[in-house]
Image (tube, rainbow, N blue to C red):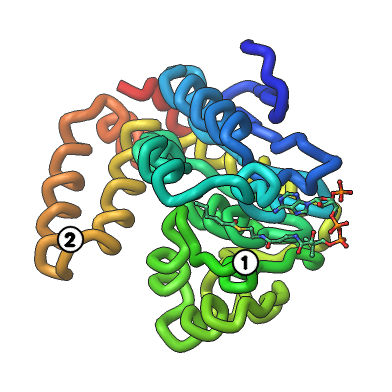
Amino acid sequence: MTDYATILVTRDDRVGLITLHRPKALNALNTELMNEVVSAATELDADAGIGAIVLTGSERAFAAGADIKEMSSQGYADVVNQQFFAAWDNLTRLRTPIIAAVTGYALGGGCELAMLCDFIIAGENAVFGQPEINLGVIPGIGGSQRLTRAVGKSKAMDMVLTGRQMKVDEAERSGLVSRVVPTDQALSTALDAAKTIAGKSALASAAAKDAVNRAFESSLAEGVRAERALFYATFATDDQTEGMAAFVEKREPNFTHR
Ligand code: HXC
């Protein structure tokens, strides 16, 4: 696999793992790191041998936000002309499920990056926040939208306007994270979940992910219509035939992702 400067990429069978690796800057997200994460995730997504991806950081920090040192000298024309950080949107186009394993700080762009993933498994030491307001700016990688959808308007307004941090209990209670586990088990739990997902039909996983995402992008009626079309489409796959035959024959399915 490609050599990267700011991330580590490994794979184990059908699971790809991307680890943010700028330890001296608490994994602050600079342009190089963004380009590397997007490139690695896109490469894993295109690999038919990969059925799920995990994105993680270090125990101390998933990511402490966009790199303030990189941003500090930028002006309006600079960020507009380079469409600063817009490439993170590419992660929303992955067909492969991607799980964030979050321990430590997930602040600003770090919180937004975790929310760009399909779901978040958090360690007990995880801390979430959108502190951009303290720097005279606002979230810029979808935080004002995804946090609001995840935790509701009142809590999102509170977080975005005060910049306060949210500990993991509150994050679980308010629906931001799917599971909280002991800090030293966050990555292994996410990898186990990824392995489970990667053992299903990749076509069904992609359809399921597409269907759930429609809930964020459409009315209820349109979302239900989209789900029905995707559901019907799964009946065109070999994996539907195999999955149902395996149940009837009381055996494990052998999905071929066709
Ligand atoms: C650049 C950062 C950084 C960041 C930490 N570091 N966060 N560098 N950008 N976002 C660096 C510090 O400068 C320091 O480097 C080293 O990491 C360790 O950080 P400390 O502050 O010494 O650690 P600690 O006292 O434990 O405090 C941890 C922290 C704090 C609470 C997470 O670092 C912090 O508040 N960071 C900024 C968080 C933030 O505001 N994030 C939002 C960014 S704006 P040196 O070299 O000094 O040792 C954003 C916008 C997104 O994300 C939208 C973009 C379009």
Decide which of 101, 181 is in the foreground and name it. Answer: 101
Q: Is residue 244 left or right of residue 35?
A: left
Label 2 vs label 1, nearer the camera: 1
Q: Which residue in the protein does label 1 denote?
A: 135
Q: Is residue 217 left or right of residue 70?
A: left
Asked where in the image residue 152 lies, by quadrant, the reply is: bottom left
Image x and y of residue 10, in percent = 69, 23
Q: Which residue in the protein does label 2 denote?
A: 223
Residue drawn 39% across the image and 31% down it: 202
Q: Is mark 1 within 8 Å of ligand 1?
A: yes
In this orientation, does residue 142 appear?
Answer: yes
In which quadrant of this rendering is ligand 1 seen? Answer: bottom right
Q: Would you place residue 59 above or below residue 133 in this image?
A: above
Residue drawn 29% across the image and 47% down it: 210
- The residues tagged by marks 2 and 1 sit, at their Cα atoms, a distance apart of 38 Å
Q: Is residue 145 left or right of residue 34?
A: left
